[in-house]
Amino acid sequence: MSATAPTRVHSHSPPTDPPPRRRRFAVEGADLSASVAVFLIALPLSLGIALATGAPLQAGLVAAAVGGIVAGRIGGCPLQVSGPAAGLTVVTADLIHRYGWRATCGITVLAGLAQLGLGCLRVARGALAVSPAVVHGMLAGIGVTIAVAQLHIVIGGSPDSSVLSNLRALPHQLAHLDPAAVTVSALTLTLLLAWPRLPGEPGRLLRKVPAPLVAVTGATAAALLTGLSLPRVDLPSWSSHALAGLPEGPALGVVAAVLTTTLVCSVQSLLGAVAVDKMAAARTGAQARLGRSDLDRELLGQGAANIVSGALGGLPVAGVAVRSTANVNAGAVSRNSTMLHGVLVVIATLLMVPLLEHIPLAALAALVMAVGVQMVSLHHIRTVNRHREVPVYAATTLGVVVLGVLEGVLLGIAVAVFLALRRLTHTRITHEEKDGVHHVRVRGQLTFLAVPRLSRTLHHVPQGGRAVVELDGSFMDHAAYEALQDWRTSHTARGGSAELTGRHGTFHSPEASSTACRCRPWTPWRNHQCAMPSGGAGPAGDPEPARADLTPATGIETRAPGTTAETRTPETAAPGTTAPDTYPHELARGISSFQRNTAPLVREELARLAREGQRPSQLFLTCADSRLVTSMITASGPGDLFVVRNVGNLVPPPGEEHGDDSVGAAIEYAVDVLGVRSITVCGHSGCGAMQALLTAEPGAAPTPLRRWLRYGLPSLERMATDAGTAPRLAERPAADAVERLCLTNVVQQLAHLRAHESVARALAAGALELHGMYFHVGEARAYLLGGPAAEGVFHDVREDMREVEEVCGPA
C-alpha cells in the first residue's frame, strides 16, 4: 500500500489510537488574508448599493454581514461571496417606492422562503436553462438604470424612481451642477479607473489594495482636507433601525414582487456559483482542492440568508461577482474566508461608525455608477451578436429599463422562444440549373412544414436529369426524410441521378449502397460505431458488424481502437477473390470514401491551394504517435500547418557529426522559404520514445531507433540535473517520470531549435516565435508553455476568469 493511500477502517476492525482531532474552526492564513481583501471591497460597495436603492444605509451593512455569515456557512459554493448586489438595486428601489422599507424587508423574507422551497425541490439546475442573452440583457438594463439614477447624485441632485423621469430631468440637473459633488465624484472615478493601471513594481504592490476602497478613501480625505460642504453618510442609531413588516397592498402585486426578487436573487447566485467553479478549477496547488458547487444547497443558503437579512432589516442578498472574484484571486481555500468577511463587516459596523460618517454620498454614488456602466459589457454584446441573439438582448435590456426587471425578463424569454421557433420553421428552398445539373438548396431546418414547398421544387427537376440536393441544416424530421427518399427512389427509377449532400458531406441512404459504410459524413468524431451492412461475418464468424470512425468534416473512415475489420471482399478486389481476415485493403476503403464523400467538398479549396502554393502560418513539430491527429487538436485545415513528425518530436542539434538532416532541412525550408511565423514543438502523454529513453540499457547494441533516440539524451540529462526546476503543468505536478521527461523534452527541443542558424536569425529579427505544447491524450487536453522556456510551466488552454463577468456581470 502506498504511504499516501487512505486507510479504510471497517466496523469490525480492532480499535486503534484515534487520529488527532482537527480544530473545528481552524482558519488558514489564505482564508484570513482573503477575508480582509473581500471586506475592504464589500464595505464601500454595500453602502453605495444601499444609497442607490433608497434604503437605510445600515441595510447594506446588514446584508453584507448576513450574506457572508449565513450564506457562507450554509451555501453550496464555498468561495462565492454573497451580499447586497448591484443587480438587485432596481428591484429593491422599486419595492421601496411602492411598499415602503419595512414591507420591502417582509418581501425579502418571503423571497427567502420561496428560495428554500425551490432548493428543497432541487430545481436549481433549471435556472441555468435561461438564455445567456436574457441574463446579459437583464444585467445591462439594470446597469443602465443604476448609472442614470446615480448620475443625478454625482452632479449634486437627487434621482427619481423611473429611468425615463431621470432622463427627462437630466438636462435641468446638468444646468445646475454642484461643483463640490462633481469634484468629489470626478476624483472617485479617476482613482477607481487609474488605480488598477499603476505601472511598474511599485504599482504591482499598490494594486493589492482594492480600487473601490482607494477611491472612496481618497475622495473622503480630499473632501475633509478642502472643507467641502457635501451630504455625507448618516448612520442612525441601531436602536431606531427598522425591522421587517408585513407588506400591504393587492395580493397579486405582492406575489409579483416576491417572484421578481426570488428570480433575480436565484439566477444571479446560481450563475455566479457556476462561474466561481470555473475560476477555482483554473487555480493550482492546494487552492484547487475544492469540488464543484452544490447548486441546490446554494439555493438553500441564499434563501436562509434572505430570511435573516430581511428579518433584521437588511437588503436582499445574492451572490456577488466582484467580491467572489476577489475571494478566489486572494487564494481562499474554504468557506471560512466568506464567513470571516461577514464578521469583519459586523465589527466595522459597531466600531467604525464615526469614520464611515465622513464619506461623501457623491463618492458612493460615483462608485455605484461605475459598477452600473460596467454591467453593460461590450464583450457580452459581441457574444450575443456572434450567436445571432441581439434581438433577445435588446428586448430584455429595453424591457428592464422601461417596464421593470420581471417584465423585461419575460419579454426577453418570449423573444428568445419566438426566434427559436422561427429558426426551426423558417426554411428557404431554391432551385437552379448549372452545367446541366439541377441544384436544389435547402437552408434551415427541414420539417414537415416545409415538405409541400420541397415537393414543388423537386418537381421542377426533369425526368432523367442529374440532381444535387444540398441540405444546410442540423435537423430533418421523419416526414421530410420520407419525402426526400421517396422522390429519390422515383427519380432514379426513371433513369435520373440524385445526390443528397449535407453541410459536411454526402448523405447515403441505406438503399444507396449495399457494400459501403452506412455512416453519414457529418457524423461527429467520437469513436463512432459504424454498422456495416449484413452479408458477411465478422472476425472468426462473429455476426457483429465491424466498426468505423469518422473524422470531423472529412468522412474518412478508420476503425475504432481495438476492433478488427470485417471479413469482406473489398470493392477493389478482383471478382471471385476473398480478402484475408486482416482486411489489408482498409486503406483503399478509406481512400474510396474520401473520393466519394469528402473530395467534392474540398476540391475547390485544394484547387486554390494548388494554384497559389502553400502558405502555412507555422511549423508544427510533433511525435509520430498515431493518436496525435494534428488537424483535430489544432482545428486546422489544408494549408494551415507545415507538419514534421518523428519518433519523440526530436530536433537534432545542427552540425553534429553523422547528424540527421531531415528535420534540419524541414526547419530551414519552413523558416527561409515558406516564411512561417511560429514553430511549435508538441509533446504528448505516454510517449513511447520517452519510455524507451528511461528504460534504455547501457551498452545495448545500436539499432536505428537507439541511434535516433540519442538526440533525446540531453532531455534525460536536463531532467536529472534540474530536478528542482523541472518543467511542470500549472494545475498539477507531473504524474510520473515519463510525463516529467515528456515536458522536459519539449523545453530541451526548443533549445535545440534556437541553435539552428535560420531560426536564430529569424528570432533576432523578430519574425519568428517559438512555442512549446503538451497534449494529454487520455484527457484530450492541450497545455501551452507559458513565459520564458526556463520557467517551464505549461498552462491549460482554457478561458480565463473573465467568464465570471460574462455570466453574471461585474457586481
Image (cartoon, helix red, strand yellow):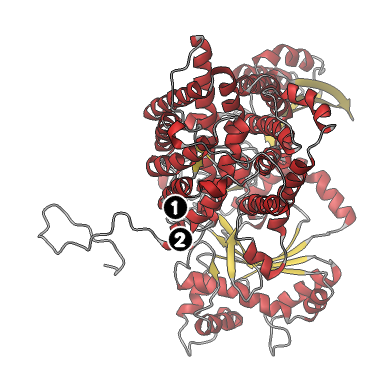
**Above or below 97: residue 180:** below
Q: Residues within 10 Å of mark 1 (few under 14, many from 20)?
A: many
Q: Residue at x 74, y 50 (%)?
A: 187
Q: Amino acid at mark 1?
A: Ser
Contact (Cβ within 8 Å) of mark 1 with mark 2: yes
Which quadrant would the N terminus be assigned to in this image?
Answer: bottom left
Pick whichever of labels 1 and 2 is earlier in the sequence.
2
Q: Nearer the viewer, residue 471 or 242?
A: 242
Percent x, y for residue 459?
A: 78, 14
- Asked whether, in this view, residue 1 is left or right of residue 123, the answer is left
**Above or below 459: residue 639:** below
Q: Which mark is residue 493?
A: none
Residue to which mark 1 is pinned: 337
Which quadrant would the C terminus be assigned to in this image?
Answer: top right
Residue 580 visible, this orientation: no
- Asked whether, in this view, residue 547 is left or right of residue 599, the answer is left
Q: CA distance from mark 1 to mark 2?
A: 8 Å
Q: Quadrant of residue 760?
A: bottom right
Q: Quadrant of residue 476?
A: top right
Percent x, y for residue 430?
A: 81, 21
Residue to which mark 2 is pinned: 30
- Asked whether, in this view, residue 113 is left or right of residue 659, the answer is left
Q: Give the secondary structure at mark 2.
A: helix
Q: Nearer the viewer, residue 774 or 157?
A: 157
